[in-house]
Image (tube, rainbow, N blue to C red):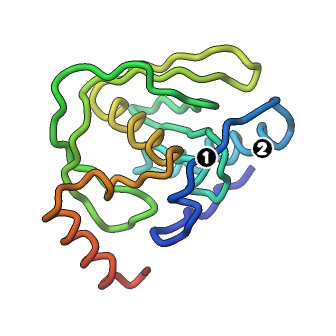
């Protein structure tokens, strides 16, 4: 399957909570293949289905050369003291702002065979898990910015050549 274009800030699909995936069929297999192909692009740590225009609960990740995916992911544990981490988003190109994220995250979901899968991450993987589940909940990292950074980010977006 091909890499899919990324939806940009302002597209309503990005603010819509994603529906759970039911039975695993060819459509879901195709979606996962597209997510994995789309996340393999250098510099990408994760791609949520909503970012490619599909409001179903699935995402892919690519951290430290480990590529994977989760269907119907749920964050089951966050641990450590939240830290401000620099973060960007493919759906908001060119912006980079500090976001409070937990240093360790555990997410569970299923794979294409319907088996339960657990992904535990620290650092960038923990951040990616939190970021992608936020997407599936209809949230962008901009929603987590403090007031001053959010104001600056919105100004940058309005002045960008892609908006």
The local crowd at label 2, few if under 14, some if 14 to 19, many if 20 or more residues have their Cα within 10 Å, is few
Q: Which mark is residue 144?
A: none
x, y percentage for residue 23? 82, 29
Local crowd size for mark 1, using a 10 Å CA cut-off: few (<14), some (14–19), many (≥20): many
Residue 147 figure quarter: bottom left
Q: Earlier in the sequence, mark 1 or mark 2?
A: 1
Query: Residue 97, relative to residue 84: is it above or below?
Result: below
The residue at which mark 2 appears reads as 30
Q: Position of residue 3 (x, y in %)?
A: 64, 55
What's the residue at 13%, 65% (across, down)? 148
Label 2: which secondary element: helix
Residue drawn 51% across the image and 27% down it:
74
Q: What residue sits 33% from the left and 76% below the top?
A: 157
Q: Position of residue 161 (x, y in %)?
A: 38, 85
63 sits to left or right of 158: right
- Between the C-alphas of marks 1 and 2, the distance is 17 Å
* Label 1 vs label 2, nearer the camera: 1
Quadrant for residue 156, please give it: bottom left
Q: Disc 1 marks which residue?
A: 18
In the image as oriented, which residue stretches furthest toward the left? 148
What residue sits 64% from the left and 59% below the top? Answer: 53
**Secondary element at tag 1:** loop
Image quadrant holding the C terminus, namely bottom left
Q: Quadrant of residue 158?
A: bottom left
**Image height of 22 relative to 161, above or below:** above
Circles 1 and 2, Cβ within 8 Å, touching? The answer is: no
Closest to the observer, 30 or 98: 98
Residue nearest the observer in this picture, 91 or 1: 91
> Does residue 41 lie above or below 155 as drawn?
above
């Amino acid at each position: 399957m091909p890499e899919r274009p990324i939806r940009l800030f302002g597209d309503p699909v990005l603010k819509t909570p994603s529906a759970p995936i039911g039975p695993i069929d060819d459509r879901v297999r195709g979606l996962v293949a597209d997510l994995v192909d789309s996340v393999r692009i250098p510099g990408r740590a994760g791609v949520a289905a909503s970012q490619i225009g599909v409001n179903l609960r699935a995402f892919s990740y690519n951290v430290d050369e480990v590529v994977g995916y989760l269907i119907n992911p749920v964050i089951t544990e966050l641990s450590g003291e939240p830290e401000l981490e620099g973060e960007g988003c493919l759906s908001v190109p060119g912006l980079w702002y500090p976001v409070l994220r937990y240093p360790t995250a555990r997410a569970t979901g299923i794979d294409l065979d319907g088996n339960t899968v657990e992904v535990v991450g620290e650092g960038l993987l923990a951040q990616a898990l939190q970021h992608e589940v936020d997407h599936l909940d209809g949230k962008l990292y901009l929603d987590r910015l403090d007031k001053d950074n959010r104001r600056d980010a919105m100004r940058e977006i309005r002045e960008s050549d892609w908006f």
